[in-house]
Image: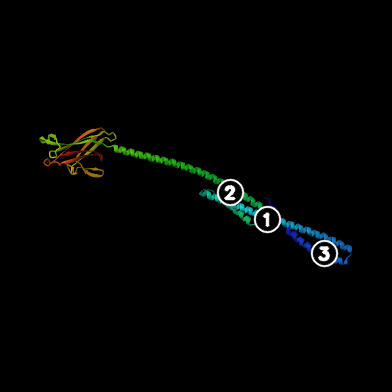
């Protein structure tokens, strides 16, 4: 919508018309005075002049009326233009602020452009509140629109890039999490396998047997017995099983013979070993050189006090090595 120039000379024309009317009035009085003294021909001449002047006055008044109407129309048009520009400015800034809110923290990356938009909007608002030119403000508003559109486009681009980066980060985190879970699973499997190997990497005693004997001929001859009163010696025999997982070398075998009253038969109170953090007494001990192959062992426990009979009842034979219980057997004396 183009602007029309406001007629700046109408106050001058209006003043001229007033002066002209006063002059015409003064002249008419003079003519009336003259008419009283002059003849009829002269009076007709002055009447014609007066009529022409009156006609000019009417034309001038009509022109002033037209100019005033046009002025009022222009004033209304300019007021409508001002309202339209103010409305467009308010709509633009409302939309801009809503866009900032919708993008949240992402809008902080375009603070410089947002400041430019705010400054331009404030400048246009000040122009609307003072003397202003429609074309100038219209051009400023169009520039502001372009800046705001550029802001939206940049924000959309940032949002797209940010969304892609977020998706990529999520994918990478998922991959890392999957790998971590896989590593944890592998570590768990490794620990379980290690535990199984540790559980399996020890020697075991199979077929633990205890045979009571009666000693004869000064201890040179042995006779199997199951009588408590005749038992002088107990022979413990078992087989150390084959296990290639066990490291070859020296192994210490401990045997505990527990009487029916839960007392361990010992040779000396100093015969002890550590098992699961506890100090235990042992009845027999044997050092062997284990090579991972099966081997048979027999150990004898001989009663010191031959005059005192052995206790009747069930005896338990427990075998230990490498801090583990590796075998057990039972026998009974009657």
Q: Position of residue 241 (x, y in %)?
A: 25, 34
Q: Is residue 8 visible?
A: no
C-beta proximity under 8 Å, tags 3 and 2: no
Q: Which residue is mark 1?
A: 76
Residue 125 coordinates in the image, percent (x, y) = 61, 55
Mark nearer the viewer, 3 or 1: 1
Q: Residues within 10 Å of mark 3 (few under 14, many from 20)?
A: some
Q: Is residue 231 left or right of residue 4?
A: left
Number of residues whose C-alpha sits closer than 10 Å to that of mark 2, classed few (under 14), some (14–19) or many (20 or more): many
* Residues at circles 3 and 1 in contact by the CB criterion of under 8 Å: no
* SS type, badge 1: helix
Q: CA distance from mark 3 to mark 2?
A: 69 Å
Q: Residue at x 29, y 38 (%)?
A: 199
Write down the residue under mark 3. 28
Position of residue 215 relative to residue 55, above or below, is: above
State the image coordinates of residue 296 (x, y, percent, origin top left): 22, 33
């Amino acid at each position: 919508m183009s602007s029309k120039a406001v007629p700046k000379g109408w106050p001058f024309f209006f003043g001229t018309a007033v002066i002209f009317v006063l002059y015409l009035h003064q002249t008419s009085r003079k003519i009336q005075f003259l008419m009283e003294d002059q003849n009829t021909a002269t009076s007709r001449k002055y009447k014609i002049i007066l009529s022409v002047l009156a006609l000019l006055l009417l034309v001038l008044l009509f022109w002033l009326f037209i100019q005033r109407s046009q002025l009022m129309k222009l004033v209304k048009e300019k007021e409508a233009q001002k309202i339209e520009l103010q409305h467009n400015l308010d709509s633009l800034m409302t939309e801009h602020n809503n866009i900032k809110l919708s993008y949240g923290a992402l809008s902080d990356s375009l603070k410089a452009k947002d400041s430019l938009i705010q400054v331009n909007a404030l400048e246009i608002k000040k122009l609307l509140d003072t003397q202003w030119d429609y074309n100038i403000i219209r051009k400023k508003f169009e520039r502001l629109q372009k800046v705001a559109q550029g802001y939206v486009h940049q924000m959309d681009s940032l949002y797209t890039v940010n969304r892609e980066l977020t998706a990529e980060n999520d994918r990478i985190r998922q991959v890392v999490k999957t790998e971590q879970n896989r590593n944890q699973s592998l570590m768990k499997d490794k620990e379980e396998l290690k535990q199984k190997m540790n559980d399996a990497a020890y020697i075991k005693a199979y077929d633990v047997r205890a045979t009571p004997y009666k000693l004869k001929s000064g201890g040179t001859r042995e006779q199997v017995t199951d009588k408590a009163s005749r038992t002088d010696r107990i022979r413990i025999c078992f087989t150390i099983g084959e296990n290639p997982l066990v490291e070859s070398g020296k192994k210490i075998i401990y045997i505990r013979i527990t009487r029916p009253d839960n007392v361990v038969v010992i040779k000396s109170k100093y015969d002890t070993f550590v098992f699961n953090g506890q100090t235990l007494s042992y009845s027999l001990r044997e050092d062997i050189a284990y090579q991972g192959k099966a081997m048979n062992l027999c150990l004898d426990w001989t009663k010191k006090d031959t005059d005192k009979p052995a206790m009747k009842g069930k005896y338990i034979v427990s075998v230990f090595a490498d801090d583990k219980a590796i075998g057990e057997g039972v026998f009974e004396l009657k």
